[in-house]
């Protein structure tokens, strides 16, 4: 049997290869523990690691060993001390196992759980595993500042560090064959004639030897490699197409949204914001708060402002359309939106929301997600949006939230990676 040991240096984390193998093996246990942790901790406390417990029975390893071969004769002693119905006293000191945590319990499990710590990076990897922005399209933008060098064949000029040895030797060999082809054929013919001569000392043979020697000198004078033979790897500078995207976060802060509902909405958007900033380098986030009127705000005001008022949801949708028209043309940007509300809206404004979405926003939006946070019956906005979901099944999704424990499961449903 062969044993392969990886002795490559891994900076200060020399067990990283084994750790990654361990994480892959117990991925299901860790994913479940991470999901439970997200429900328990505050979303603002997401960027730290977590302790993961795995039952001892789930990390047991199968073992191959040699058994006792041959024929065995065993004599089993009889029982001369106990009869049926006798009571055996409990051994003192915690039982015969001798180790803390290994004695039997009421459920029959007697081993401690295996506990280990995952880092912040590993925790967030499991939180956002298999999530993505749907329908993301790469768009080439003018004035792009990032480039990469790509191979574009070979050149006769370049720096010594870019010499392609194989191509250069191939070119040199081709040149020598082309320049000496006729001479080699002639040399082969003369050598054959010399071989057929019976008398190697005759004048004809001597003349053939002289011609052969002249041809060999001419062939040898052809240089083995020439400057013309050198070939260099050619690299050209090409711009990188990026998936430029903008995410609009629309949150209802009207008086119908009590503090608990607002906290749930804020936690959803905090999770969304963390997901975007972690997974997408080239993305912008636009925050819009609305009551009777909508306003674009910064991150601080979006999450911590206490402004409130009535409810006109269409004001946020109209403001989003104005911002898109002014700063984010659909031909260059992937446009996304997430809206959170309790579903309460002013009179007939839900019909206006339906018109703005179907006629102005959804035709240019990659994905629009609506979450309604309420423990009551579905509100007017939900019924209006249900008709939109039927008309735009590919880029419009809506989910219902009741409490904070629903945030993570709903978030994963909305942004689950689609099968190719």
Image (tube, rainbow, N blue to C red):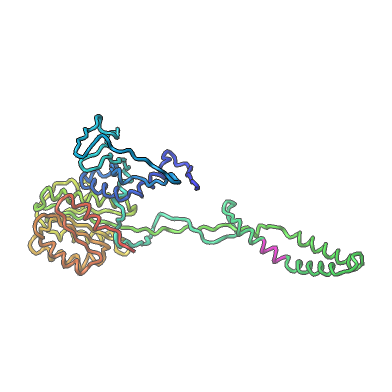
Q: Is 262 one of the magenta-colored residues?
A: no
By secondary structure, the bulk of the magenta-drawn segment is best described as helix
Farthest-out residue, right: 202
Work out whether residue 154 can be spotted: yes
Reply above or below: 302 against 174.
Answer: above
Q: Is residue 40 left or right of residue 379?
A: right
The residue positioned 9% from the left and 55% from the top of the image is 310
x then y, percent, for residue 131: 29, 55
Q: Is residue 226 left or right of residue 397?
A: right
Total label count?
Answer: 0
| Picture quadrant of residue 208 | bottom right
Work out whether residue 66 can be spotted: no
| Picture quadrant of residue 286 | bottom left
The residue positioned 9% from the left and 56% from the top of the image is 376
> Which residues are drawn in magenta?
173-179
Reply above or below: 116 against 312.
Answer: above
Quarter of the image with the C terminus is bottom left
The residue positioned 20% from the left and 54% from the top of the image is 288
x then y, percent, for residue 22: 36, 46
| Picture quadrant of residue 118 | top left
Q: Is residue 104 left or right of residue 257?
A: right
Farthest-out residue, top: 93
Reply above or below: 369 against 49.
Answer: below
x then y, percent, for residue 214: 82, 63
Farthest-out residue, left: 347
x then y, percent, for residue 146: 41, 54
The residue positioned 60% from the left and 59% from the top of the image is 167
Using the image as rendered, state which of residue 105 and residue 315 is in the foreground: 105
Using the image as rendered, state which of residue 65 and residue 388 is in the foreground: 65
């Amino acid at each position: 049997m062969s044993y392969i040991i990886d002795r490559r240096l891994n900076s200060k984390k020399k067990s990283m290869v084994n750790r990654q193998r361990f994480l892959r093996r117990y991925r299901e246990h860790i994913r479940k523990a991470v999901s439970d942790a997200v429900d328990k901790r505050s979303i603002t406390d997401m960027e730290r690691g977590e302790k993961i417990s795995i039952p001892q029975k789930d990390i047991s390893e199968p073992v191959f060993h040699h058994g006792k071969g041959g024929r065995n004769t065993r004599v089993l002693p009889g029982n001369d001390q106990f009869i049926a119905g006798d009571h055996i006293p409990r051994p003192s000191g915690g039982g015969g196992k001798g180790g803390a945590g290994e004695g039997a319990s009421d459920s029959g499990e007697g081993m401690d759980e295996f506990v280990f710590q995952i880092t912040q990076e590993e925790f967030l990897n499991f939180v956002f595993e298999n999530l993505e922005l749907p329908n993301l399209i790469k768009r080439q933008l003018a004035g792009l500042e990032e480039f990469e060098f790509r191979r574009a064949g070979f050149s006769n000029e370049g720096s010594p560090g870019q010499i392609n040895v194989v191509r250069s030797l191939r070119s040199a060999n081709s040149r020598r064959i082309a320049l000496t082809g006729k001479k080699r054929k002639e040399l082969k013919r003369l050598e054959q004639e010399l071989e057929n001569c019976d008398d190697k000392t005759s004048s004809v043979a001597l003349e053939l030897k002289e011609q052969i020697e002249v041809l060999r000198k001419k062939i040898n004078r052809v240089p083995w490699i020439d400057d013309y033979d050198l070939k260099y790897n050619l690299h050209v500078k090409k711009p990188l197409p990026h998936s430029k995207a903008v995410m609009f976060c629309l949150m209802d802060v009207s008086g119908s949204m009590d503090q608990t509902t607002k906290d749930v909405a804020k936690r959803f958007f905090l999770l969304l914001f963390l997901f975007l900033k972690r997974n997408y380098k080239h993305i912008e986030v636009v925050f819009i708060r609305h009551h009777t009127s909508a306003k674009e705000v910064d991150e601080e005001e979006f999450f911590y402002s206490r402004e409130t008022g009535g409810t006109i949801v269409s004001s946020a949708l109209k403001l989003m359309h104005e911002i898109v028209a002014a700063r984010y043309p659909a031909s260059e940007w992937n446009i996304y939106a997430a809206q959170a509300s309790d579903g309460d809206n002013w009179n007939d404004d839900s019909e206006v929301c339906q018109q703005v979405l179907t006629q102005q926003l959804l035709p240019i939006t990659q994905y629009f997600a609506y979450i309604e946070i309420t423990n009551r019956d579905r509100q007017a906005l939900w019924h209006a949006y249900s008709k939109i979901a039927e008309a735009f099944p590919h880029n419009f999704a809506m989910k219902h939230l009741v409490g904070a424990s629903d945030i993570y499961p709903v978030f994963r449903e909305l942004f689950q990676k689609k099968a190719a």
